[in-house]
Image (cartoon, coloured by chain):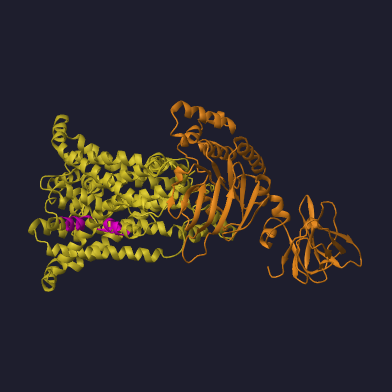
Amino acid sequence: MHLLALQNITKRYAPDRPPAVDGLTLTVDQGEILALLGPSGCGKTTTLRVIAGFEVPDTGRVAIRGETMAGPDRWVPPEERGVGVVFQEYALFPHLTVAENVGFGLHRFDRSARRERVRQILELVGLESFASRYPHELSGGQQQRVAVARALAPAPALLLLDEPFSNLDADLRAQMRDEVEKILRNTGTTGIFVTHDQEEAFTLADRVGVLNQGRLEQLDTPERIYHHPDTPFVAEFVGAADFLPGLVTTGGIVTELGVFANMEGREMGEKVKVMLRPDDITFIPRPDGQGMIIRRYFRGSENLYCIRLPSGHRVHSSQASSSVFPLGTRVRPEAHLIHVVTFPEGD
Amino acid sequence: MTSPRRWSPVGLGLVVPTAFFVIGPLAFLAWMGIAQEGAEFLDRARDLALPAVVGQVALLATLTTAWACTLGVPLAWLTVRSDLPARRLIRWLAPLPLAIPPYIGALVYQIVLAPGGLLPNLLGISILPVSLYSLWGASWVLGLFTYPYLYLLVSGALERTNPSLEEAARGAGLSPRQVLLRTTLPLLRPSLLAGALIVFLYGWADFGVVSLLRVRTLTTIIYDYLQGTLEWAFPAALSVILTAITVLVLLLQLRVLGRAGYTQIISGAKPPSRVALGFWRWPAFAYCAAVLTLSLLLPFGLLGYQASRLTATAGIVFVLGQWPYFVNSLWTAVTGASLALVIALGVGRFEGLRGTRPVSGLFQIGYAIPGTVLGLGLAGFVHATLPWIYATPLTLIVAYLVLYITPACQAVKAALAQLHPSLEEAARSLGRGPLSTFWSVTLPLIKPGLVGGWILVFVLSMRELAATLIVRPPGFDTLPVRIWIYAMDVGPEPRAAVLALALVLTIALPWLVLLSLRSRGISPSG
């Protein structure tokens, strides 16, 4: 049995607007960490709110451990779902101390059990000495940890995190990401978090669901999402990608940058576009080269070159930080594809 | 949040009767007023020189507004944006004159300026060139005790002004003076207008000051008619005129404020820079000191002096004799304020639902009705529909409720707006039901706002005079009524001063609590 199952969830906020979530179906297993990834307005936060019980879905079913939480004939309020939530702004209760915040969900425990549980969970997040502080006396990272501790205290079956790291500075973000992952893994808590940052989704999650306009485009491991995107949208959202037209022949897929193996079994004569990532493309400067460097983006750890092909198509190539070529240099671009990913021409 | 929200029976049970009491009096007056025969009305209007009276009231309200602006606006700018000496102290004192009801201000200035008063005696003349018992005297008193409305609104707006806007104007090449004229003042327009409007309508609808200073206005004519004849039709017609003009002014405000966005609150923005006054520092200080002397020091000092002329035993005997009136005031105001707050909470919880806007709009009518008009309408309406509460203290409480439900609603709404919705959702996700969430999260966080709202309604009800005079049951006098009767019958003599002092202190203490709540700036959002 899956820990969480969403079946055909649709949620519309206004009748004249497109649905925020459109026919979403997915399952999450015990102990798994799932990332919902997508641009703002793609419906990822709405999905989270439907799971938590803050929104009533228009259609579909939400089930936790096989028990229906929301469906045509049943609606369980948020307080009875056993789902923990970490809010984007943390939503710590400003009138309560750290210990009172963490103990807030333990109202069914007796006094000593509650104190023990609060102590234990504060130790887990490394905030034992801050128990009597008020939220506004804490730094951003500490507030985040209290928010996680508070949500974990009642030992929820499922923890939902809404853009949990977006309010933190870059270096603190990486550190908190590691800490939150460790806490989730150590406690065996199943987690679903929402983010628009693909790097965050890749490093933290076992599986990533990419959402676009309320629809689930792909649900897969981070590696599959990056190397074998199902749709051009996924391909472009999780990393830079160029698409080059190609024709499927018996010898392979013929493109301007050479012939690639037909790994996906496309039909002969089909027109496709081939996905090229910047790390798939190298080039050699040659006076008679077919391509020309038209732009260089210095990224610190790498140089990203934009190369114009004779057909007018542009491809990007990632080069070492120290390799610098002037604009206008003629080059011979080469594509070395380990995974050949193609999409139908019309997509 | 969760599951489609609907008006609960409890919410409706609170709102519907309130709406009934807001609409009822107005409908009654309109009906009575129209029932009046046209020819007869015109006859009486001519006898009373009604157009002249209306012009006089309009002039009174205009003079009052101009005077209050002169007092309040410079004070606001100086305390918020300049390096005025003793800035903090002045800032703390400036709103306090609101604790002195203008009719008590009139009493105080009778002691000073009336023929045979302190100032004429000092100057050795019998009467001053400009009489206190005139339009000028009434505007003088009204402006002195209503300027804090303007002060509070304008200084609040000045504090919230995003300094980057002024810096942008400087960056665009404007001089400091041009910045003041072309950026700062236009941004203050809504608060200036709102403050001026409050003061204008106060002057327009005032009864206490004009009756004490013997200025004939619509409200005094209505009251005299009621006392003399016990006949409804003509005062009702006058009330319709009075209310129509009030509503007209309010609509005008909506038009003027129009569409432009003025709010630019940036939390955590750095505070605005202060302008160095240079040579003008001490003259500016003298100005502020003069305003506070006239509106705060002098009233308290004179009331205290006048009261001290009573011998100790005579004073105690008198105060004990007046004790029942004090109790009357207290319990009706407390009940009114508590009821208003509960209803406001009911309305506030449903904010955003269909029907909330009309409801709070309806309540605002109650706030805009002049006290005299509401008193008249409510008395007539209750007499006609609910005779068993007519001439009971209950009518008085209903009057307070109708008059002051709007400030209560505004306080609750402001408090709830500060509450981030995810705080309540967090509580729900931690296993607390709606009721438990309300008690453990919502209520503690909005409490400062609720306390503030309660105090405001309490203070306003405590000092209400015009409506109380009309709807109070025979013999059920409140403190303001006693003061007014003393001052009308025998003038500003020591016993009236003792009562006035008691009232002012009862109002001033909660008012201080309210101000300190505001300045602590409790922000419950996470």
Q: Residue B13: x percent and y percent?
A: 26, 52
**Which residue is rendered at x = 16% and y = 36% of the image?**
B323
Above or below, comparing residue A115 to residue B369 in the picture: above
The image quarter in which residue B386 lies:
bottom left
Foreground pick, B458 / B42: B458
**Which residue is rendered at x = 41% and y = 44% of the image?**
B91
In the rendered image, the residue lying farthest to the bottom is B39
In the rendered image, the residue lying farthest to the right is A287
Q: Residue B158: x percent and y percent?
A: 46, 52
In the rendered image, the residue lying farthest to the top is A112
Q: Residue B238: x percent and y percent?
A: 18, 64
Side of A311 relative to A159 (left or right): right
Q: Is residue B81 magenta?
A: no
Q: Colour of chain B?
A: yellow
Q: Which chain is orange?
A: A
Above or below, comparing residue B97 to residue A243 in the picture: above
Foreground pick, B505 / A183: A183
Foreground pick, B435 / A21: A21
The image quarter in which residue B458 lies:
top left
Magenta-tinted stretch: B361-379
Side of A12 relative to B42 (left or right): right
Q: Residue B291: x percent and y percent?
A: 35, 47
Quadrant containing the N terminus of chain A is top right
Magenta-drawn stretch, dominant element (helix, strand or loop): helix
Residue A36 visible? The answer is: yes
